[in-house]
Image (cartoon, rainbow, N blue to C red):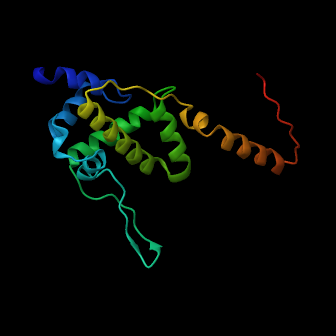
Amino acid sequence: MPPFEENLRRIETIPGIGKWTAELILAEIGTDMDRFPTAEHLASWAGMCPGNDESAGKRRSGKTRKGDPWLREAMVEAARAAARTKDTYLSAKYHRIAARRGSKRAAVAIGHSMLVIIYHILEERTEYVDLGPTYHEERNRQAVIRRHLRSLEKLGLQVTIESIS
């Protein structure tokens, strides 16, 4: 692994990925991302993207396809480790998805997100930058305010909004 130390160091900065997992990822996908046109192609090859079985407007199974078993297992394990980290984007995303879809689907979704991040790190030779646990709330601030107002109105409360600053 000595020739790949720089790539290993970059991948290890992602929450939930340690040295062993980073080595396994590089062993399975390599460092040359030219073989995958996009990050989504990498995720599909690894079997970490949801299926789309639809017929006559009826959605059936969304089961993931078979892919590299070693990489899938490592990514799900890394996703579960990332879910236990404090104040990170991946942890917040895991908990948001797990609340709606369950922990197993959330782990696969976070594994998919991590593969996309790895693709961009290797393709662009950049460092990982965590977006923070409140990324989605800040991005959709007005939607969050409206949602909380509706919740309070359902509880029978009337609220007046004033900006602090």
Q: In the orientation shown, which residue stands out farthest toward the bottom?
A: 56
Q: At 17% from the left edge and 40% from the top edge, which residue is drawn?
A: 28
Q: Is residue 106 above or below residue 92?
A: below
Q: Nearer the viewer, residue 41 or 16?
A: 41
Q: Which of 5 and 165 is in front in this view?
A: 165
- Where does the C terminus fall, quadrant-wise? top right
Q: Residue at x 39, y 62 (%)?
A: 62
Residue 130: quadrant of the picture: top left
Residue 160: x and y, percent? 86, 37
Describe residue 11's horizontal placement relative to residue 34 as left or right.
right
Q: In this view, does 18 lie above or below 99?
A: above
Query: Which corner quadrant holds the N terminus?
Result: top left
Image location of residue 39, percent across then percent down: 29, 44
Q: Residue 163 placed where, x, y %?
A: 78, 28
- Residue toward you, 78 or 43: 43
Q: Whole-percent x and y of residue 75?
A: 31, 40
> Is 12 displayed left or right of 148 in the figure?
left
Instruction: Please count the marks in the image.
Output: 0
Residue drawn 29% across the image and 31% down it: 121
Left or right of 117: which side holds 87?
A: right
Please say if 109 is above or below 52: above
